[in-house]
Image (cartoon, coloured by chain):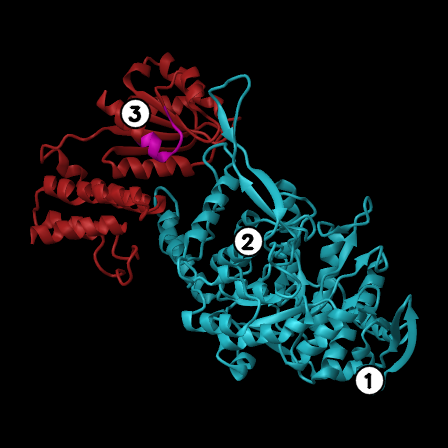
C-alpha cells in the first residue's frame, strides 16, 4: 500500500477555466515566437529531427540555437506524458502514487541549501534580578556537510507528515568534489530514509553510478523501474526561455533511462519573468511545456512532473521573495495548469524570507503551506526546514513544520456528517438535555480515542512561558535517537565495492562504527 | 454474589457508565447494567451500603485517579466516572443515615446575577457529587437575595459561586455582602470560580476560597471540610 497523502476534497482554484485556456494558448504562442534559446546541442538536434524550427545563433563565444516548438509537438507530448506517476521507496509502503487529475497532496522536504543552521540554548541572567535566568535559542549558520545530510534524512524519516525526502543541503565537506558529490549525496540520503528520495544531479558522468546504486538497493534494473526509489529534479530551462546546456543534457540522459523527473522552472516575477501575473504564468507554463516536450521526444512515456517554482521579486533587493503573497498565487495557478494537462504537479510552499525560525518564519510558511495545499498539488516540496529563501536549512524548523502539517492534514479530513452520525448525536442531544448538568463531556471519550479530535499544538509551554523552540529541539533529539533502517549489510558491501567515490565514513557497517 | 455486584459497580464507575444505555470506554457494553441498575440491584439484595460506597465507588474513583495520573485517563474520563458516582450517591442518599454514614457535606452552587454561563459550575457539580457531597444546583442568573434565601433554607456547609463575565463577577461581592447583612455569612463557606476571577479577587471580596478549575474547586472544598 502506498502512502495516503491527503486528498483535498474541493481544491481551491484561483483562475477560471477560460483563464487556464488563455494561459495555455499564450504559452503555445511563446513556444513559437520568440521560442527558446537552447545551449544544448543534443536538445537542438532532438527538436530539429522532430520537426521544430531550429536556427543556429550564438551567445558570446558559445554556440546556441533558437528553437521554435510547433503546437503539434507540445500536444503530442502532453498526450504521451504519463498521467499517473509512481515514486517508489526503499520501503514499498512509502511509495507515492500521483495522479494528475487527483488533488492528493504529498508533503516533501527540499531544497538544496548551502547553509545548515545549528541551534543551542545559552542561558541569560536578568540584569535587575540575577535570580532570574532564561534560555534563549541562538542560531549559528555554517557550511553543510554530508553528516548533516544524513542527520536530516534520519529526522525526516521519522517526521509523521513528511511523505518523501528531497536532499536538503549541498554537501561541502573538504573531501567532497564535483566528481564524488552525487554518489555521496544519494547514498547518505538513501541510507537514512526508507521514503522516496529526489535530488538534482551535479555531474552527468555520475548518473550511471547513481542509477546503479539505486538498482542495487531496489533489487535490479527491472525492480528499479517497477519501484523507482529515486527521482530527479532538473531546472533545464533557465528563465526567461533558455535551455541550459549541462542540466538539459542531464535531463535527456535521465529521460532515456525512464526514471521519474520533475521538469522545473523558477522564474522571478519582475526580473526573469514579467511582473504581471498573466505574463509570468504564460512564460513559466511555456518553459515547463518545453521541458515536457523534450522529455517525451527523448523517451515517449517517460514519467515527468510539471515542476513549478515561480517566485516574486523583492522590491527592495530584487532577490527572491518566497514569503510574498504573489508567490503563493503563482504556485496555485501552476497547480491548476498542471491539473488542466492531467500531469502530476511538483509545487512549492513553506519557504520563508526570514533567516531564522521565529514569528515571521511561522507566518510566512504557514500562510503558503495552507493556501498552496488547499489547491491540491500532488508533490508539495520545500515545505520542511527551509529559511532565507532556500539558502538555509534548519532541522529544528523541519520539526516545527511537521506540527504545521499535522494541523493541515487534520483540517483536510473528510467531513463526518451522514445520517448515522446525525441519528447517534440526536439521541445524545435528547439524553443530555434531560440531565441536570446538560454537558456532553461523557461522549467525548470514545471519539477522543478514535483519533477524530485534533491533538493540541505539541510544543505548547506551561503557563505564560513560550517553550516552542525548546520543546521542538527536544523532539528533534528524540527523533535523532530513534533508529533508522539502514540499507542491509550485503547491499551496502556491494555498493561500496561497485560504486567509486563513496566516503568510507558513510559505511555504517565498517569496523569500529 | 456480593463481590460480583460490587466489582461490577467498580468496573462501571471506571467505565463511566451511569445507565445500561451508556457506551463507556470499552466496546460492547451498551445494554449491560450500568451503575444505576447495579446500585438498585445491590440495594434489592440488601448489600451493606458501606461496602457499596467503600469497596465499589471509592475504590473505583481511586483507580480512576491513578489512571488519570498515569495519563491513561483524561478529564472527560474523570468526569464521566464522577458523574456515575454522583448518581449512585443520589440513589444511596436515603440509606446513608440508616447505615450510620455521615454525609460529607452539603454544597449549594449558583451562577451569579446577570450571568447565564454554567459549564464550569456544572463540572464542579459533577465532581462534588462524585466525591460524595450533597449538591444542590440553584441555577443561573441568581439574585443575591435568592441565594441568601436558599442558604437560609438549605443550611449548607458550602456555597459555590460562579461567573464568566467581568461585568457579572462584581455580583459575587454583592452576594457575599447580602449574606453578611442577613447574618448568614459565618454559617457558610463561600468558594468562587470562573474565568475572570482569581485568588486575589476572592480575598478582596471576602470569599473563603477560590478554585481555578473544577478539580481545584473540589480540592479547596475538601481542605475547608477538614478544617
- In the image, taking residue A119 as reference, residue A277 lies left or right, namely right
Chain on which label 2 sits: A
Q: Residues within 10 Å of mark 3 (few under 14, many from 20)?
A: many
**Residue A191 rendering spot, x and y as whole percentages:** 49, 65
**Residue A159 rendering spot, x and y as whole percentages:** 49, 57
Q: Nearer the viewer, residue A117 or B38?
A: A117
Q: Which residue is mark 2?
A: A148
Q: Residues within 10 Å of mark 2 (few under 14, many from 20)?
A: some
Q: Residue B199's image quarter?
A: top left
Can you tell which mark lies on residue B158?
3
Is residue B221 shown above or below A333? above
Can you tell which mark lies on residue A472?
none
Q: Which residues are magenta?
A: B210-218
| Mark nearer the N terminus (2 vs 1) | 1
- In the image, taking residue A329 as reference, residue A453 lies left or right, namely left
Of badges 1 and 3, nearer the viewer stands 1
Amino acid at each position: 500500500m502506498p502512502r495516503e497523502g491527503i486528498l483535498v476534497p474541493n481544491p481551491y482554484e484561483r483562475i477560471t477555466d477560460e483563464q487556464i485556456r488563455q494561459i495555455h494558448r499564450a504559452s503555445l504562442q511563446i513556444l513559437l515566437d520568440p521560442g527558446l534559446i537552447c545551449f544544448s546541442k543534443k536538445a537542438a538536434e532532438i527538436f530539429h529531427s522532430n520537426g521544430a524550427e531550429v536556427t543556429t545563433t550564438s551567445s558570446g563565444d558559445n554556440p546556441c540555437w533558437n528553437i521554435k516548438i510547433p503546437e503539434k509537438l507540445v500536444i503530442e507530448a502532453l498526450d504521451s506524458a504519463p498521467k499517473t506517476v509512481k515514486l517508489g521507496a526503499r520501503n514499498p509502503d512509502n511509495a507515492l502514487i500521483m495522479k494528475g487529475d487527483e488533488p492528493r497532496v504529498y508533503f516533501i522536504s527540499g531544497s538544496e541549501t548551502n547553509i545548515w543552521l545549528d541551534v543551542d540554548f545559552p542561558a541569560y541572567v536578568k540584569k535587575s534580578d540575577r535570580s532570574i535566568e532564561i534560555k534563549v535559542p541562538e542560531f549559528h549558520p555554517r557550511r553543510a556537510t554530508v553528516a548533516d545530510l544524513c542527520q536530516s534524512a534520519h529526522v525526516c524519516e521519522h517526521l509523521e507528515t513528511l511523505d518523501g525526502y528531497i536532499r536538503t543541503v549541498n554537501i561541502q565537506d573538504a573531501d567532497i568534489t564535483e566528481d564524488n558529490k552525487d554518489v555521496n549525496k544519494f547514498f547518505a540520503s538513501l541510507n537514512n530514509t526508507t521514503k522516496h528520495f529526489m535530488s538534482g544531479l551535479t555531474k552527468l558522468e555520475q548518473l550511471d553510478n547513481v542509477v546503479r546504486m539505486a538498482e542495487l538497493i531496489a533489487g535490479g534494473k527491472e525492480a528499479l523501474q517497477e519501484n523507482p526509489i529515486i527521482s530527479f529534479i532538473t531546472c533545464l530551462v533557465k528563465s526567461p526561455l533558455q535551455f541550459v546546456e549541462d542540466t538539459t543534457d542531464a535531463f535527456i540522459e535521465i529521460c532515456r533511462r525512464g526514471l521519474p523527473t520533475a521538469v522545473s522552472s523558477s522564474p522571478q516575477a519582475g526580473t526573469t519573468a514579467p511582473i504581471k501575473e498573466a505574463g509570468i504564468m504564460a512564460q513559466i507554463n511555456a518553459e515547463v511545456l518545453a521541458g515536457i516536450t523534450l522529455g517525451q521526444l527523448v523517451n515517449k512515456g517517460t514519467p515527468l512532473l510539471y515542476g513549478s517554482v515561480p517566485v516574486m521579486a523583492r522590491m527592495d533587493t530584487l532577490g527572491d521573495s518566497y514569503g510574498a503573497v504573489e508567490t503563493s498565487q503563482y504556485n496555485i495557478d501552476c497547480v491548476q495548469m498542471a491539473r488542466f494537462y492531467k500531469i502530476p504537479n511538483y509545487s512549492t510552499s513553506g519557504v520563508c524570507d526570514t533567516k531564522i525560525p521565529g514569528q515571521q518564519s511561522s507566518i510566512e510558511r504557514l500562510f503558503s503551506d495552507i493556501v498552496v495545499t488547499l489547491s491540491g498539488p500532488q508533490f508539495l516540496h520545500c515545505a520542511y526546514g527551509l529559511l532565507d529563501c532556500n539558502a538555509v536549512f534548519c532541522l529544528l524548523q523541519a520539526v516545527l513544520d511537521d506540527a504545521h502539517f499535522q494541523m493541515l492534514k487534520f483540517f483536510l479530513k473528510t467531513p463526518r456528517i451522514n445520517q448515522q452520525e446525525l441519528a447517534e448525536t440526536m439521541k445524545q442531544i435528547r439524553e443530555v438535555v434531560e440531565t441536570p448538568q446538560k454537558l456532553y463531556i461523557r461522549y467525548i471519550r470514545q471519539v477522543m480515542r478514535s483519533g477524530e479530535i485534533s491533538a493540541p499544538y505539541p510544543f505548547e509551554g506551561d503557563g505564560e512561558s513560550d517553550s516552542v523552540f525548546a520543546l521542538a529541539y527536544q523532539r528533534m533529539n528524540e527523533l535523532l535517537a530513534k533508529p533508522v533502517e539502514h540499507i542491509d549489510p550485503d547491499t551496502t558491501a556491494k555498493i561500496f565495492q561497485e560504486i567509486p567515490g563513496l566516503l568510507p565514513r558513510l559505511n555504517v557497517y565498517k569496523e569500529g562504527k | 454474589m456480593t463481590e460480583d455486584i460490587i466489582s461490577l459497580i467498580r468496573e462501571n464507575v471506571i467505565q463511566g457508565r451511569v445507565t445500561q444505555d451508556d457506551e463507556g470506554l470499552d466496546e460492547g457494553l451498551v445494554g449491560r447494567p450500568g451503575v444505576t441498575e447495579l446500585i438498585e440491584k445491590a440495594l434489592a439484595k440488601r448489600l451493606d451500603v458501606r461496602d457499596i460506597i467503600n469497596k465499589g465507588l471509592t475504590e473505583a474513583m481511586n483507580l480512576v485517579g491513578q489512571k488519570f495520573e498515569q495519563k491513561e485517563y483524561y478529564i472527560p474520563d474523570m468526569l464521566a466516572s464522577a458523574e456515575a458516582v454522583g448518581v449512585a450517591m443520589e440513589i444511596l442518599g436515603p440509606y446513608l443515615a440508616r447505615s450510620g454514614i455521615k454525609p460529607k457535606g452539603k454544597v449549594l452552587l449558583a451562577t451569579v446575577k446577570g450571568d447565564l454561563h454554567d459549564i464550569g459550575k456544572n463540572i464542579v457539580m459533577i465532581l462534588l457529587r462524585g466525591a460524595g457531597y450533597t449538591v444542590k444546583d440553584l441555577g443561573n442568573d441568581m439574585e443575591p437575595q435568592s441565594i441568601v434565601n436558599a442558604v437560609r433554607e438549605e443550611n449548607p456547609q458550602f456555597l459555590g459561586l460562579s461567573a464568566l463575565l467581568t461585568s457579572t463577577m462584581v455580583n459575587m461581592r454583592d452576594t457575599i455582602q447580602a449574606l453578611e447583612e442577613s447574618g448568614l455569612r459565618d454559617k457558610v463557606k463561600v468558594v468562587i470560580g470562573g474565568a475572570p476571577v482569581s485568588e486575589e479577587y476572592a480575598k478582596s471580596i471576602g470569599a473563603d476560597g477560590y478554585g481555578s478549575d473544577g478539580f481545584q474547586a473540589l480540592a479547596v472544598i475538601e481542605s475547608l471540610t477538614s478544617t
